[in-house]
Amino acid sequence: MRVLLVEDDEPVAESLRRGLIRYGFEVDWVTTGAAALAHSAPYDVVLLDLGLPDTDGLDVCKALRARGDVPIIVISARSDETDRVVGLELGADDYVSKPFGVREVIARIRAVMRRAQPRAAAEAAGPDAYGTRLTIDRKAARVRLDGEEIPLAPKEYDLLSFLTEEPGALMSREQIMEAVWDANWFGPTKTLDVHVAALRRKLAGAITIEAVRGVGFRLEIVTSADGSSPS
């Protein structure tokens, strides 16, 4: 996933850029509103600082939104509620106040991208197939096993949708909790284990979810006739 980062504060930008790259994002970094509007390379989401040296970030937000539906997340030291409201009214999809953690920003990126999917590729592509038995219709938020719809609780669906974004990838508990629950979740992570157990039970034979002690979970798609996952 490619991110356009519009931020003139070099230490903040470098820290955020390094963090995003560690999580597998590609980052194009510009320092002015003019550079953001002139940027011609494709990108999937914009991280936009409001305090730019050449123009108000709100004007950049408005101009970018007029060009299309690419998700925009405003990042700003401004804590005034008016700026939040105006930013959202001008087309921003989310608003993060400084100081923030890289993990919070990543969780918000993933959240806005999931919300954006029905507007874009998910509408045209239809349900996603995982192996021969499992399909996920992200537009309708429906899961089918062997053609029969499987009732999932909202967070069970969100967890499955997140883990199937990158089958085979090891996801830490922190990544999962931030992406599926909330960046500011302070409850017990035991709830994650409960939801994993529910998915294992409901989708047995189509997926496996491996617990990696002290780290997190890895979802694999079952592809073989004997119900095993690829090695």
Image: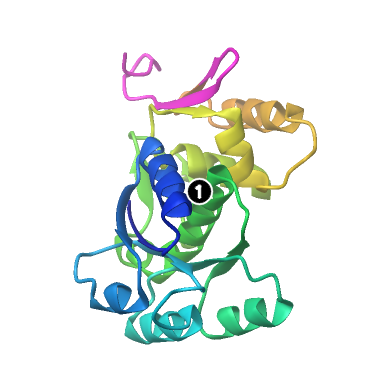
The residue type indicated by label 1 comes to Ile
Residue 126 x/y as whole percent = 35, 59
- Which residue is at the far left? 40
Indicate the colouring scheme.
rainbow
Left or right of 85? Residue 118 is left
Picture quadrant where residue 191 is located: top right
Q: Residue at x 49, y 55 (%)?
A: 109
Q: Is residue 152 visible?
A: no
| Disc 1: CA contacts within 10 A as few (<14), some (14-19) or many (>=20) | some
Extent of the magenta region: 210-231
Task: Please name the residue that numbered disc 1 is placed on.
Answer: 106
Inspect the magenta stretch and tell me whether residue 213 lies in it.
yes
Left or right of 36? Residue 134 is right
Q: Residue at x 36, y 77 (%)?
A: 33
Q: Element type at marker 1?
A: helix
Q: Quadrant of the C terminus?
A: top left
Q: Residue at x 53, y 45 (%)?
A: 102
Residue 84 x/y as whole percent = 64, 76
Count of numbered circles on the image: 1
Q: Residue at x 53, y 24 (%)?
A: 217
